[in-house]
Image (spheres, rainbow, N blue to C red):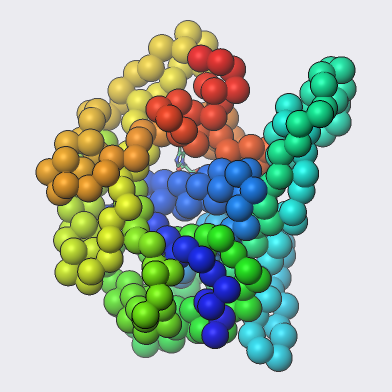
Amino acid sequence: MPLEHIRHIVLVLSGKGGVGKSSITTQLALALSLQGKSVGVLDVDLTGPSVPRFFGIEESRVRQAPGGWIPVEVHGKQTLPSNQTYGDTDAQSGAANGAPQNLEQHVGPLSCMSLGFILSNRGDAVIWRGPKKTAMVRQFLTDVLWPELDFLLIDTPPGTSDEHISLLETLLKQTAHTTQLAGAVVVTTPQAIAISDVKKELNFCAKTGVRVLGVVENMAGFVCPNCSECCNVFSKGGGQVMAQEFGVPFLGSVPIDPAFLMLIEEGVRPRYPKGTVVEGRTLVEREEGV
Ligand code: ADP
């Protein structure tokens, strides 16, 4: 049973594309890994498998073992001095600044499986009929040889499609009589249209009996790099209002972070989870003591 060594499975959903679902999935994975957890990311967004690009491992390919696919390692288990962040070079780290190194930070291993690792031509659009897509989703849940994981995050396609139904059917069958399926994180942006779409997502969870762990509002405001003033480009607070309306937790807001976009577009491997919100502040703000 490929999922049997996984403690918690979390689905990441969004009502429509482009709201930052894959960004939140990958940043959440890095944040959990920085807490020492072993994490896997399954990219089931067949029409736009962007997770490999977000982890800077686009060139990687999965290996086929007799029992199934071996996921690609983003990074292994690491131990860092507490004053060094994941991906820092020695020159940037506290070690080079002469800071004490008596404390250590354990970074958990992170692995990933995506259709992007299988397509022979990465630029190819996936134009498949429904049955082929649902068969691939099923195979992703049954044929990937995950190592022992604390968390498996599943990046799903936007909306509520056949792939979602197939995903849930297979997942519920595989995890029946266990508490492995923790629930879903729903990602939205503050614009009204995305929020109306996401209501469908919350209804889908209610109908299929998937617990909603909470709502994340992405691209909520733009922090100007020059004056640090936060400008609410779109309306603000919609995610929180909607979460209240549906009686589900509001997990927080992530601002538009130009540095994050630049790192992704330039294919730079993430040095640490930009834009991740912990206790109301992004990790960048926490780092800078804002
Ligand atoms: P989805 O998975 O919902 O289609 P993505 O995560 O692929 O959306 O994000 C769409 C684009 O927006 C990507 O180029 C990503 O880098 C960018 N993006 C997402 N969230 C943010 C953010 N908070 N700040 C800056 N850019 C972001």
Residue beneath the point at 24% across and 28% down? 236
Give left or right: position of 81 versus 203.
right
Q: Quadrant of ligand 1?
A: top left
Q: Quadrant of residue 241?
A: top left
Total number of numbered labels? 0
Q: Quadrant of residue 193?
A: top left
Residue beneath the point at 35% across and 61% down? 183
Residue beneath the point at 29% across and 77% down? 165
Provide residue 261's location: percent of width, then percent of height. Answer: 54, 37
The answer to whether residue 190 is seen in the rendering is: yes
Q: Quadrant of residue 234?
A: top left
Q: Residue furthest left?
A: 245
The residue closer to the viewer here, 208 or 269, is: 208
Give left or right: position of 212 versus 12.
left
The residue closer to the viewer here, 101 or 209, is: 101
Q: Residue furthest bottom?
A: 66
The answer to whether residue 123 is seen in the rendering is: no
30 vs 205: above or below? above
Provide residue 254's location: percent of width, then percent of height. Answer: 41, 34
Residue beneath the point at 38% across and 62% down? 182
Provide residue 39's location: percent of width, then percent of height. Answer: 59, 58
Provide residue 142's location: percent of width, then percent of height. Answer: 51, 84
Quadrant where the image shows the N terminus: bottom right
